[in-house]
Image: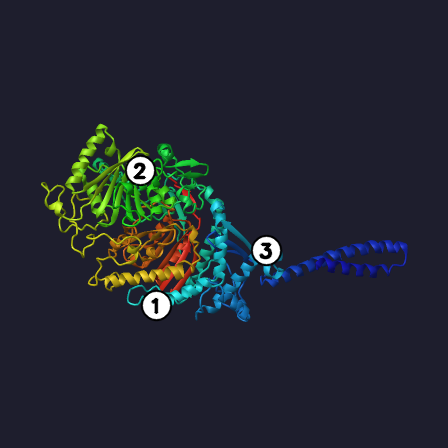
């Protein structure tokens, strides 16, 4: 418009001046003077017209002058960490008290009032949005405003820049930051698109509300007050309800944090991180509600495990402690670490199961020592960008499946996947044995120490196989007694016969009566002097323990042999032994006590009463996962205060409804990306039982200060572990896709601070992984603030009275690492 106006005005001026000239000389002078005036007028006119046009365009956006630009993060699929939305910030009306509920939206009171006048069409579009919430008396209007903005932005993203009307564009720029862009990302693009379309039809929100209404009736009196008829939906980039209760200064700090995330985050940022950080470094970050910056430090490389890498404590050990492998045991710092573990250079989203069993990204676990030492045994090899796992092991170089079938054919009664469901694999290596047992419907708890065989457990977890870092040393394993159907050792390098057989007696404690111990090692089938001596010592020890040597079989294909021992099912042998060595444990020795309990070279009596746990073999899988254990009786109080069998049944039904009606469809989780799951406070294992038909496995954690329900979890054919969340978990960083915390944080805050637990959550979860928190509203709010300070993407929150639920995803953000000034 400015160019057109300038041309028409110039033509009129020139015509008027030319008609007034009367002589050639005068005409020349007048001509040049007129020309100069016209040029000046044209320049001035162009200036005023251009200014008016710019002002009108700026005014259309409601911005006086150059508006500030803010950055926000919208709800996305798991295919990317965030959509970055940049738009001009709008100023509030001068008569209003400025209240910015979302720094990214910048909405004003006048605009909210105008949007309330929209017709039924906008309301209908919001009703179909599963990310929306039911009408709330306090926040209904605000939520409709934010959802209208979300719908508009989604429409703009789909139409493309060329098709967006001028009045709707307003400088909006959307950039999707893909996590890895690799083969696995492309393979699931269609699945994620279908899930998004399903959410757009409103299936998720409806199921969440229906679950809440049903659970309100079922859970009464069972302490499961986590029912959700009221929904508060939080999305980055939309109006955040909790910010109504935040001071303005805190909201400003969060806005700055998001801006720094957009600068530091993204796919390529991980490549700028050092591969190893062997020196002490400082992480500087600010937390919600703190005016001063918090400085924390630790010797934190990408593979940092606080309780296993405590060099200060390990240096204090004596030589005899090393002989008992105490330097490989847990030595936790006095206070929980407050540092964030960096990402290895080039980290990318893990390969999905089941492909991950055969290959993982080398950049995620950049260790090659096992390739050099064990490559000839088909443990692991390097193949381009991948570490590949041919499925072999020291005792089964021709493949784990052949070896697994060889074991079943050698001893009657093993019956993989029916009678034998839960296995303990000692000295697991890269856990190929446990990985292939999934094909026989068996779940194995694999463990190995963090030793010179670098990252073997880390590789196992990256492959999607259950494993923990642990050692058979001076303390009991973190499991109850009589829970494993079979214990397996394939060249696990454990001196079973040493120290009066203390380590083999620990296996006796955790092995179910009638269960097998499979020992596949050179003393079984070789005749070297050392092997012969070890075999004689093992023979004497196992006889004194009343273990039956069922058979010795040789696998000619692999050139190995295995001995099959069985634990007795009665006390008759114990009572008729000539020498009471090893001795029987005293009556006050709790066989289930396992958290930091030193080994005791003794044996517990076998239960024989029909009502005792361990007297009868569990039902075959999968029936055992559904039915209450036979030894639960109505005279026992359950974890929720009702008779134990009733508690068990209600818990199972409760989690089936929650999983089916909320978790699978209502949270926006891309379950094709989920393999390694941890239930941080498991109780009966109902959550894991409800997920058993999906391609995941669940590590059920029973807290040491909670009711001891871990035996019930194992009886159901599931796996679990004792743990104290006031300490770090014995796993590598970035090893779990999903954590589930049911009333964990409200309980843990009675014993220790919540912040170190949240930092531990950040260490355990992979970038792109997530956490579901179900807890009291105050605890949920505290966790939410801490997760936001760590730049997690808080996707959804719900509340009902004093109970709440939160779902958040971890981004790839890491703070700047400052070198130690010393």
- Spot occupied by residue 266 in the image (x, y as percentages of width and height): 49, 48
User: How many neighbours does mark 2 have within 10 angstroms: few (below 14), some (14-19), or many (20 or more)?
Assistant: few
State the mark number for residue 160: 3
The residues bearing labels 1 and 2 have C-alpha atoms spaced at a distance of 49 Å
Who comes first in sequence, dot 2 or dot 3?
3
How many marks the image carries: the answer is: 3
For image coordinates 23% across by 29% down, the residue present is 527
**Which quadrant would the C terminus be assigned to in this image?**
top left
- Residue 473 lies, with reference to residue 21, above or below; the image says above
User: How many neighbours does mark 3 have within 10 angstroms: few (below 14), some (14-19), or many (20 or more)?
Assistant: few
* Callout 3: SS: loop
User: How many neighbours does mark 1 have within 10 angstroms: few (below 14), some (14-19), or many (20 or more)?
Assistant: some
Q: Quadrant of residue 67?
A: bottom right
- Spot occupied by residue 369 in the image (x, y as percentages of width and height): 37, 34
Q: Nearer the viewer, mark 1 or mark 3?
A: 1
Residue at the disc numbered 1: 216
Q: Quadrant of residue 301?
A: top left
State the mark number for residue 451: 2
For image coordinates 60% across by 55% down, the residue present is 161
Is the C-beta separation of discs 2 and 3 under 8 Å?
Answer: no
């Amino acid at each position: 418009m400015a160019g057109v106006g300038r041309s028409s005005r110039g033509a009129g001026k020139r015509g008027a001046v030319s008609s007034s000239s009367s002589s050639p000389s005068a005409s020349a002078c007048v001509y040049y003077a007129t020309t100069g005036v016209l040029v000046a007028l044209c320049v001035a006119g162009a200036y005023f017209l251009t200014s008016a046009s710019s002002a009108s365009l700026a005014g259309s956006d409601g911005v006086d002058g150059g508006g500030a630009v803010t950055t926000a993060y919208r709800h996305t699929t798991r295919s990317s960490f965030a959509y970055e939305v940049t738009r001009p910030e709008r100023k509030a009306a001068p008569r209003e008290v400025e209240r910015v509920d979302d720094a990214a939206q910048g909405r004003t009171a006048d605009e909210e009032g105008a949007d309330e006048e929209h017709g039924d069409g906008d309301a209908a579009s919001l009703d179909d949005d599963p990310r929306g919430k039911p009408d709330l008396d306090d926040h209904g209007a605000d939520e409709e405003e934010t959802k209208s903005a979300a719908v508009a932005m989604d429409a703009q993203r789909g139409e493309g820049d060329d098709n967006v009307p001028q009045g709707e564009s307003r400088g909006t720029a959307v950039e999707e930051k893909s996590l890895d862009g690799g083969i696995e990302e492309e393979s699931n693009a269609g699945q994620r698109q279908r899930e998004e379309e399903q959410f757009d039809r409103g299936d998720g929100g409806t199921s969440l509300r229906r679950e809440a209404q049903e659970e309100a009736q079922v859970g009464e009196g069972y302490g499961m007050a986590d029912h959700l008829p009221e929904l508060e939906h939080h999305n980055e980039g939309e109006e955040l309800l909790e910010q109504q209760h935040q001071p303005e200064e805190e909201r400003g700090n969060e806005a700055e944090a998001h801006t720094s995330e957009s600068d530091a985050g993204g796919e390529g940022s991980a490549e700028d991180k050092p591969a190893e950080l062997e020196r002490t470094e400082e992480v500087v970050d600010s937390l919600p509600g703190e005016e001063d910056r918090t400085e924390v430090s630790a010797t934190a490389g990408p593979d940092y495990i606080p309780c296993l890498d405590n060099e200060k404590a390990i240096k204090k050990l004596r030589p005899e402690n090393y002989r008992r492998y105490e330097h490989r045991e847990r030595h936790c710092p006095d206070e929980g670490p407050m540092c964030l573990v960096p990402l290895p250079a080039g980290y990318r989203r893990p390969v999905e199961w089941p492909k991950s069993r055969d290959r993982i990204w080398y950049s995620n676990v950049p260790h090659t020592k096992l390739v050099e030492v064990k490559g000839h045994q088909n443990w692991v090899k390097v193949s381009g960008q991948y570490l590949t796992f041919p499925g072999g092991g020291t005792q089964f170089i021709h493949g784990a499946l052949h070896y697994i079938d060889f074991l079943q054919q050698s001893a009657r009664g093993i019956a993989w996947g029916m009678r034998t469901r839960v296995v303990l694999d000692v000295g697991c290596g890269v856990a190929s044995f446990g990985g292939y047992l999934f094909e026989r419907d068996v779940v194995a708890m694999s463990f190995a120490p963090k030793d010179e065989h670098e990252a073997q457990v880390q590789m196992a977890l990256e492959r999607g196989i259950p494993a923990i870092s642990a050692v058979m040393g001076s303390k009991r394993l973190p499991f109850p007694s009589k829970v494993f159907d079979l214990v397996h050792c394939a060249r696990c390098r454990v001196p079973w016969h040493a120290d009066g057989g203390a380590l083999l007696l620990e296996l006796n404690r955790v092995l179910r009566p009638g269960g097998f111990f499979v020992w596949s090692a050179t003393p079984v089938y070789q005749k070297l002097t050392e092997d012969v001596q070890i075999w004689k010592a093992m023979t004497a020890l196992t006889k004194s323990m009343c273990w039956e040597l069922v058979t010795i079989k040789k696998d000619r294909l692999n050139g190995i042999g295995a001995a099959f021992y069985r634990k007795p099912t009665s006390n008759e042998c114990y009572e008729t032994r000539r020498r009471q060595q090893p001795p029987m444990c005293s009556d006050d020795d709790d066989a289930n006590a396992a958290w930091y309990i030193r080994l005791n070279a003794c044996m517990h009596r076998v239960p024989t009463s029909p009502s005792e746990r361990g007297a009868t073999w569990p039902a075959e899988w999968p029936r055992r996962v559904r039915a209450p254990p036979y030894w639960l009786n109505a005279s026992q109080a359950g974890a929720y205060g009702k008779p134990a069998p009733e508690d068990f049944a209600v818990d199972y039904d409760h989690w089936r409804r929650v999983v089916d009606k909320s978790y699978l469809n209502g949270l926006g989780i891309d379950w094709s990306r989920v393999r390694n799951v941890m239930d941080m406070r498991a109780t009966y294992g109902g959550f894991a039982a409800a997920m058993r038909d999906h391609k995941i496995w669940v590590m059920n954690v029973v807290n040491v200060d909670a009711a001891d329900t871990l035996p019930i979890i194992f009886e159901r054919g599931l796996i679990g572990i004792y743990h104290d969340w006031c300490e770090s978990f014995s796993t590598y960083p970035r090893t779990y896709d999903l954590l589930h915390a049911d009333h964990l944080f409200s309980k843990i805050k009675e014993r220790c601070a919540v912040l170190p637990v949240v930092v531990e959550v950040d260490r355990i979860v992979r970038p792109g992984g997530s956490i579901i928190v179900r807890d009291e509203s105050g605890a949920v709010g505290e966790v939410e603030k801490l997760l936001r300070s760590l730049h997690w993407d808080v996707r959804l929150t719900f509340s009902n009275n004093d109970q709440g639920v939160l779902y958040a995803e971890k981004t790839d953000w890491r703070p700047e690492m400052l070198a130690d000034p010393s």
